[in-house]
């Protein structure tokens, strides 16, 4: 089932999300709904606060970002529950990000090149791995959602920050053309 995505300005996106336990109600349905919602909106990642649940869960699928051979080597399709950053490494690099909660806004953000993460998969099995490149980037963006942080809070260019102010205000008020269903902080 496709769920509405909470838009920039909604207070849930600013909250620190809480860890969950295996008895969290209807978790497998929630995860299935999150995949549906993410693919419908053509995203590569989606965090639970973006669908109105303030819990430490996000999903990432970078497979479609590559051709077949590369996807097998580097791409991931993974559920992350209660993730913990073990280590960040590598030279910080700048990359243009976007966010399903902030439609049609893009901007450059600087983040570490590599990240080592510990998390639980959808069966609550412990996992640990190191990610780099696009995977590290998406994971760090989604992890920030669990901390109540958005990429527009981290833009490297202060002029860009000013330029998007009006657009953010329009998103907050729901005065935008929609490609998918959203929940707004204030609606007209
Ligand atoms: Ni996002």
Image: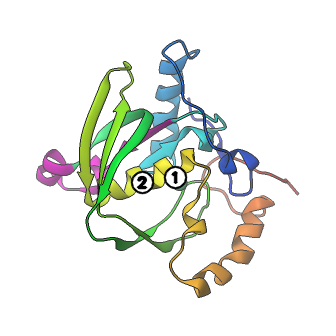
Res. 144 mark: 1
Q: Residue at point 59% right, 84% down?
A: 158
Q: Which residues are magenta?
A: 57-74
- The relative height of residue 108 versus residue 56 in the rendered view (above or below) is below
Q: CA distance from mark 2 to mark 1?
A: 6 Å
Q: Quadrant of the N terminus?
A: top right
Front residue of this view, candidates 18 and 163: 18
Whole-percent x, y for residue 114 in the image: 28, 58
Asked if disc 1 is less than 8 Å from ligand 1, the answer is yes
Q: Is residue 171 left or right of residue 66?
A: right
Q: Is-magenta flag for residue 69? A: yes
Whole-percent x, y for residue 14 in the image: 68, 51
The residue identified by callout 2 is 140
Q: Residue at point 77% right, 68% down?
A: 169
Asked which quadrant contains residue 117, the reply is top left
Residue density around tag 2, few if under 14, some if 14–19, many if 20 or more, within 10 Å = many
């Amino acid at each position: 089932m496709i769920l509405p995505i909470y838009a920039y300005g909604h207070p849930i996106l600013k909250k620190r999300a809480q860890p969950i336990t295996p008895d969290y109600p209807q978790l497998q349905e929630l995860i299935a709904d999150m995949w549906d919602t993410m693919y419908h909106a053509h995203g590569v990642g989606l965090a639970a606060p973006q669908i109105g649940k303030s819990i430490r869960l996000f999903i990432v699928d970078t497979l479609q970002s590559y051709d077949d051979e590369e996807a097998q080597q580097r791409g991931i399709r993974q559920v992350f529950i209660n993730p913990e950053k073990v280590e960040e490494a590598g030279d910080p690099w700048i990359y243009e990000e976007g966010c399903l909660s902030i439609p049609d806004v893009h901007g450059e953000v600087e983040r570490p090149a590599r990240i080592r993460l510990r998390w639980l998969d959808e069966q609550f099995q412990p996992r640990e791995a190191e990610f780099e490149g696009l995977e590290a980037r998406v994971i760090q963006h989604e992890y920030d959602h669990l901390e109540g942080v958005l990429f527009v809070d981290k833009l490297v260019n202060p002029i860009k920050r000013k330029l998007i102010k009006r657009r953010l205000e329009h998103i907050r008020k729901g005065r935008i053309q929609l490609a998918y269903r959203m929940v707004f902080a204030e609606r007209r």
